[in-house]
Image: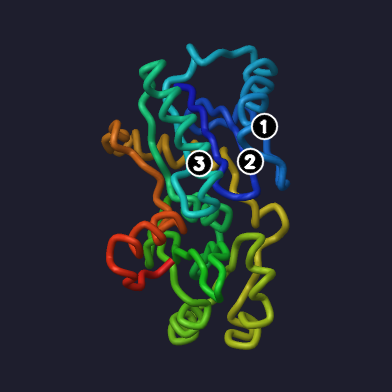
Amino acid sequence: MKILAIDTSTLVMGVAILEEKRVLGELITNSHKKHSIRLMPAMAQLFEELELTLEDIDLLAVTKGPGSYTGIRIGVTTAKTLSWAHQIPLYGISTLAVLAENGFHFNGWIVPLLDARRERVYVGIYQREVEQLRAIYSPQIMTITKLLDILKKQEKPVLFLGDDCERYAEQIKMHLSNQAKFGTLAENIPKPSQLGYLAWGKLQQKEAPETEQFAPDYLQLTQAEVNWLKQHNHGGKHEN
């Protein structure tokens, strides 16, 4: 079984093709260049190098968020289109779950983190149990202060993952001291091969693939949605 994995949810754009638990090829970039322009050429390059086509793909995987609104839409729309056009089952996976897999061998809490602005973060808390990671806290949005208070009370070693951790590094060190560890450069980048592996695991557990109603999971409203709600609720306040 061959799996095509697509990740455009952050500055990192990644495409990978797996054969079950074996990575056949992976292409990753970490830049501000538009994913909408670069995604299809990246896929074409990988297929060409592996001498494969979409007809060889049995399963699709895509990151569903959180992350960049535009980036997530690009990945999800592309994956849904391929799934519909080629009748390939599709699984959507949290960006945070994909990032957490980079810390699989860490003996403690694994905390993938993405900046959500205004001193807030997209975050999940994971811990290894046998051969998989279990979500102690499912992906959500909270203030960095609340997150650090939760972690401080547990007195467990914590591995922070993600390029955005650098933004909060001083706060993290001040609150958690030696309790806090940070990922390496490679560990801070979500990998499409991990995404494909997680999708394959869902298939093995006989989880139902996504339906036509599958949509991104932003974890918060877009600015356009906030503005619409304000206009239709007489100026009522809503969290962005």
Q: Is residue 11 above or below residue 81?
A: below
Dot 3: what SS? helix
Measured Cα–Cα span from mark 3 to mark 2: 12 Å
Q: Position of residue 5 (x, y in %)?
A: 52, 33
Look at mark 2 in the image and give the residue it sits on.
13
Q: How is the image coloured?
A: rainbow
**Is 235 left or right of 186, judged from the image as shown?**
left
Q: Quadrant of residue 119?
A: bottom right
Amino acid type for the residue under numbered disc 2: Met
Measured Cα–Cα span from mark 1 to mark 3: 19 Å
Closer to the camera in the image, 77 or 102 = 77
Q: Quadrant of residue 203?
A: top left
Q: Is residue 164 above or below residue 81?
A: below
Marking on residue 38: 1
Question: Looking at the rendering, in which quadrant would you find the N terminus?
Answer: top left
Query: Counting other residues with Cα less than 10 Å from the Cα at mark 1, is it few (<14), some (14-19), or many (20 or more)?
Result: few
Q: Are marks 3 and 2 in contact (CB under 8 Å)?
A: no
Query: Counting other residues with Cα less than 10 Å from the Cα at mark 2, is it few (<14), some (14-19), or many (20 or more)?
Result: many
Q: Position of residue 171 (x, y in %)?
A: 63, 82
The reply to whether residue 223 is in sight is: yes
Q: Residue at x 49, y 69 (%)?
A: 109
Query: Counting other residues with Cα less than 10 Å from the Cα at mark 3, is it few (<14), some (14-19), or many (20 or more)?
Result: many
Dot 2: what SS? strand
The label nearer to you, 3 versus 2, is 2
Lower sequence index among marks 1 and 2: 2
Look at mark 3 in the image and give the residue it sits on.
195
Q: Residue at x 58, y 81 (%)?
A: 179
The label nearer to you, 1 versus 3, is 1
Dot 1: what SS? helix
